[in-house]
Image (spheres, rainbow, N blue to C red):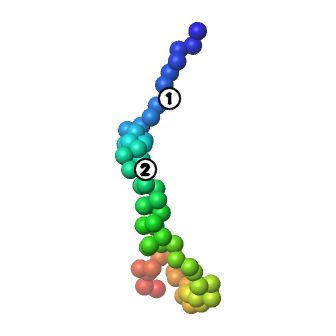
Amino acid sequence: MPLAVKPYVSEATRFLQSLRIQDPELEAKQKQGRALLWDKPQDFELCQAFDAAKVPQKPYVYDTE
């Protein structure tokens, strides 16, 4: 007869689970904050111009020769 073993749950996982229980709107707030700073529309032509303007760099930038 095998013993019933509870799966291990780390302290960090328990903390995050309790945080989600305390504030059910937490995930929506996180998505809103991300959209505020990171999720911006990208200009494809501008990105191509930046890539074309890159200057090749030596593998060791502090080499003087």
Residue 57 position within the rendered picture, expressed as x and y whole percent measured from the top left: 52, 82
- Which mark, residue 38? none
| Residue situated in front as seen by the camera: 29 or 42 | 29
Q: Is residue 8 visible?
A: yes
Q: Which residue is mark 2?
A: 24
Of labels 2 and 1, earlier in sequence is 1
Residue visible at 62% across and 84% down in the picture:
44
Residue 56 position within the rendered picture, expressed as x and y whole percent measured from the top left: 55, 84
| Residue situated in front as seen by the camera: 47 or 51 | 47
Q: Which residue is mark 1?
A: 7
Q: Amino acid at mark 2?
A: Pro
Q: Amino acid at mark 1?
A: Pro
Residue visible at 38% across and 42% down in the picture:
18
Label 2 packing within 10 angstroms: few (<14), some (14-19), many (20+): few
Left or right: 29 in relation to 58: left
What is the secondary structure assignment of the residue under circle 2?
loop
Point out the residue furthest to the front here. Answer: 24
